Image: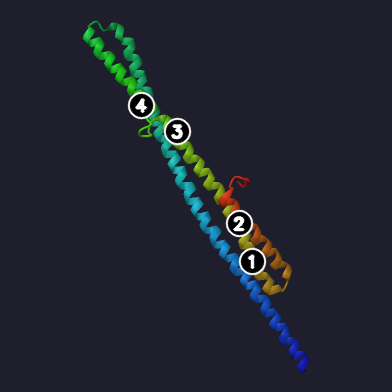
Amino acid sequence: MGAHESMEHAEHAEHASGSNKKIALLIAVIALFLAFSETLGKGAQTEAISKNVEASNLWAFFQAKSIRRTVVQATAEHAKLSMGTVGDDAAKAALQKQIDDWNKTAQRYRSEPETGEGSEELAKRAKHAEHQRDEATAKYHHYEIASAAFQIGIVLASATIITGMIVLAWVSGILAIAGIGITALGLYAPHLLHLH
């Protein structure tokens, strides 16, 4: 091997080494974004599960309050019907007081703003938890798609080192940019795209 061939070989090796360093840097950057999207995805998934449980609990509480209100209202209505059969004025007054108490209790079961535990307030809280669950689920789907784009980008960038096909590195970079965009949509506008 002549000096000229040896120099060409060294230049080629140096060029390949420089390209490989750039590809390795691309892989490292994509892996960083993959870590972010995976972390955000796990957080969103946990939030979605938590808010789903919260909404279910609130709806169960809502149903219990509604049943109690219905029972108390039915009891008060039944007592009203019985008023005509009570002859004693003192007994009528006591029964009327009990009916009034039952009606107040039924009203409290319907709306109790000070505690937030009336059926109307519980329904609002449950709907809010459902909205938060849906928001977290939408974010989760974005992060999962972004993670897939980053993972494919890493594979393609790795394949560039083996094959020397620079086009794979470009596709890898495009996937990374797409993954960043989808992650940003998950963070700031999770309902812009309907991914699920």
Residue type beneath disc 3: Ala
Label 4, secondary structure: give it. helix
Residue type beneath disc 1: Val
The answer to the question of whether label 3 and label 2 lie on touching residues, with beta carbons closer than 8 A, is: no
Q: Does residue 127 sit above or below 179 in this rendering?
A: above
* Residue that mark 1 sits on: 155
Q: Position of residue 190 (x, y in %)?
A: 58, 47
Residue at figure coordinates x 52%, y 47% from the top left: 136
Residue type beneath disc 4: Arg
* Residue that mark 4 sits on: 108
* Residue that mark 2 sits on: 146
Q: For residue 151, which quarter of the picture? A: bottom right
Label 2, secondary structure: give it. helix
Instruction: Residue 1: tell me if it is visible.
Output: no
Q: Nearer the viewer, mark 4 or mark 2?
A: 4
Q: CA distance from mark 3 to mark 2?
A: 35 Å
Q: CA distance from mark 4 to mark 3?
A: 14 Å
Q: Is 36 placed left or right of 61 in the picture?
A: right
Whichever of callouts 1 and 4 sits on the residue coming sooner in the sequence is 4
* Residue that mark 3 sits on: 123
Q: Which mark is residue 97?
A: none
Q: Is 93 placed left or right of 151 in the picture?
A: left
Q: Does residue 122 sit above or below 146 in this rendering?
A: above
Q: Position of residue 118 (x, y in %)?
A: 38, 30
User: Label 2: how many residues lie within 10 Å, few (<14), some (14-19) or many (20+)?
Assistant: many
Q: Position of residue 55 (x, y in %)?
A: 45, 39
Q: For residue 114, which quarter of the picture? A: top left
User: Label 3: how many residues lie within 10 Å, few (<14), some (14-19) or many (20+)?
Assistant: some
Residue at figure coordinates x 48%, y 36% from the top left: 127
